[in-house]
Image: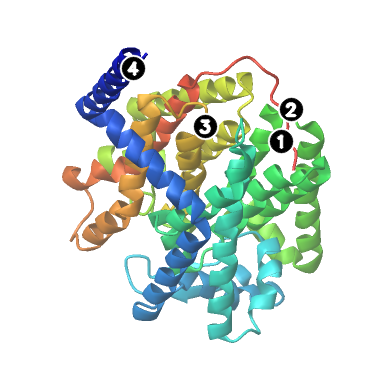
């Protein structure tokens, strides 16, 4: 008996030693194991991590106060909707974009009217707090649309992603400029993920689209997922806001919807690095006449096919977050002008890449790492600073144009990752609140 026990103990020691040797011989596995332990620790201390990230953000604001020009446009331009000069107003700044006009629909100006009486310092603090809260809602909404959901970790993961997302370039640019993107993104994603009724989901999408036209692409998500009632509510809400603004400011409404809505030159130059749309990237590479080039139409067709493939795959495997990310990224790519701060949808995209059904694929991991690299290092703002020092932009320097395609490249890679993720054929159901 003693000899048998000693032999079993020796065998157990040999197995343990072999396991340790195998772990040491597999550095990738060991690194993944360390990464999992690190994520588990962070998840267990998510509240403290978010508080630390927020404290660091406040410190950065104190040392380097931002100049939120877009928030000034909202605040100073909104009262002109009542006097008839909304689209004649412009904030004069420094080059390269010396004039910032009010470019949103008249309904947006009506919503911004309460900002005008507030003291500037109070408005800055309030806008920062609302935007950061919206970032948390954006992360929570993305996790809520995941299939399968991450379980009881949803709240902690939302805080972790908000803490990390706070340092991505699109989010920081939105906060620095006082932009409305985070609030609109939270309205869309929070409404779709957290609201039970079709009326609430559709109204959230319709209101967001009435403030700024870019969120309207979420209507395609409602159609793809066959949420017909929500889509009707979205269209009805949009029409109601247009009618309301028409009653209050008929002259401004006629001018916007018949003339200015298609005037991209009023928004800004297409060629600048600040524009990260597909057209902006190709304009820097091929020149200002890119729309007449066969390469433009080939790129347009390729991106459209990739988006359609991604959407079909997401619907087939009941991947609600994947479908929404595909729609939003396609909208950003196809829009003539997608400023860097419009790309806050990189945060839901990274959440899908990290937690979605394709997280085990090499393409998903590489795309997630690339998104993190280019957004956390603020590559696009750095390239924009180099661009501002150019004496001329025609022809655009190739050494600057190629790295300036990073958001478009990341978006296309994400669409391919969405398309290739595995999953069974299931009916895409609307997630419960």
The correct choice, above or below, for 207 with respect to 281 in the image is below
For this rendering, which residue is in front, 33 or 284?
Answer: 33
Q: Nearer the viewer, mark 1 or mark 2?
A: 1
The answer to the question of whether label 1 and label 2 lie on touching residues, with beta carbons closer than 8 A, is: no
Q: Percent position (x, y) of residue 202?
A: 76, 44
Q: Tag 4 or tag 3, which sits nearer the N-term?
A: 4
Numbered badge on residue 431: 1
- From the image, tell me which residue sits under label 2: 226
The answer to the question of whether label 4 and label 1 lie on touching residues, with beta carbons closer than 8 A, is: no
Q: Percent position (x, y) of residue 295?
A: 33, 27
Q: Tag 2 or tag 3, which sits nearer the N-term?
A: 2
CA gap, disc 4 to disc 1?
Answer: 60 Å
Relative to 84, 296 lies left or right = left
Relative to 425, 250 lies left or right = right
Q: Tag 4 or tag 2, which sits nearer the N-term?
A: 4
Q: Is residue 212 visible?
A: no
Q: Is residue 157 visible?
A: yes
CA gap, disc 3 to disc 4?
Answer: 52 Å
Numbered badge on residue 356: 3
Q: Nearer the viewer, mark 2 or mark 4?
A: 4
Q: Percent position (x, y) of residue 374?
A: 31, 47
The correct choice, above or below, for 164 with respect to 331 in the image is below
Placement of the C terminus among the 4 image quadrants: top right
- Rendered residue at 31%/46% (across/down): 373
- From the image, tell me which residue sits under label 4: 2
Q: Percent position (x, y) of residue 218?
A: 63, 40
């Amino acid at each position: 008996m003693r000899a048998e026990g000693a032999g079993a103990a020796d065998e157990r020691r040999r197995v343990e030693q072999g396991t340790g040797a195998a772990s040491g011989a597999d550095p990738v596995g060991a690194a993944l194991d360390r990464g999992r332990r690190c994520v588990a620790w962070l998840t267990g201390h998510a509240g403290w991590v978010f508080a630390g990230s927020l404290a660091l953000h406040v410190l950065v604001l104190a040392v380097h106060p931002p100049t939120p020009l877009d928030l000034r446009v909202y605040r100073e331009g909104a009262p002109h909707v009542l006097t008839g000069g909304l689209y004649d107003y412009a904030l004069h700044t420094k080059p390269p974009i010396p004039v910032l006009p009010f470019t949103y629909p008249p309904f947006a100006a009506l919503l911004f009217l309460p900002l005008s009486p507030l003291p500037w310092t109070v408005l800055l603090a309030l806008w920062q707090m609302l935007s950061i809260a919206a970032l948390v809602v954006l992360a929570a909404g993305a996790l809520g649309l995941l299939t399968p959901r991450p379980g009881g970790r949803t709240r902690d993961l939302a805080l972790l992603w908000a803490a990390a997302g706070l340092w991505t370039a699109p989010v920081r640019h939105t906060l620095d400029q006082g932009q409305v993107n985070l609030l609109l993104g939270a309205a869309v994603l929070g409404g779709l993920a957290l609201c039970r009724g079709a009326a609430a989901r559709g109204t959230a999408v319709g209101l967001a689209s009435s403030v700024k036209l870019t969120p309207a692409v979420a209507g395609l998500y409602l159609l793809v997922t066959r949420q017909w009632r929500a889509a009707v509510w979205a269209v009805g809400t949009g029409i109601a806001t247009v009618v309301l603004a028409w009653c209050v400011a008929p002259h401004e409404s006629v001018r916007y919807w018949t003339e200015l809505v298609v005037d991209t030159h009023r928004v800004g130059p297409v060629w600048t690095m600040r524009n990260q749309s597909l057209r902006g990237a190709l304009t820097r590479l091929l020149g200002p006449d890119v729309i007449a080039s066969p390469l433009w139409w080939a790129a347009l067709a390729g991106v459209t096919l990739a988006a359609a493939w991604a959407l079909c795959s997401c619907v087939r495997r009941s991947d609600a977050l994947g479908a929404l990310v595909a729609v939003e990224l396609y909208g950003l790519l196809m829009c003539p002008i997608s400023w860097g701060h419009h790309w806050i949808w990189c945060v839901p995209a990274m959440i899908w890449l990290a937690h979605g059904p394709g997280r085990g694929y090499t393409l998903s991991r590489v795309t997630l790492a690339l998104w993190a690299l280019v957004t956390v290092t603020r590559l696009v703002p750095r390239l924009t600073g180099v661009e501002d020092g150019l004496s001329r932009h025609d022809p655009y320097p190739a050494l600057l144009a190629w790295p300036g395609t990073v958001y478009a490249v990341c978006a296309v890679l994400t669409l391919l990752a969405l398309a290739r993720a595995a999953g069974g054929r299931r009916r895409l159901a609307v997630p419960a609140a």
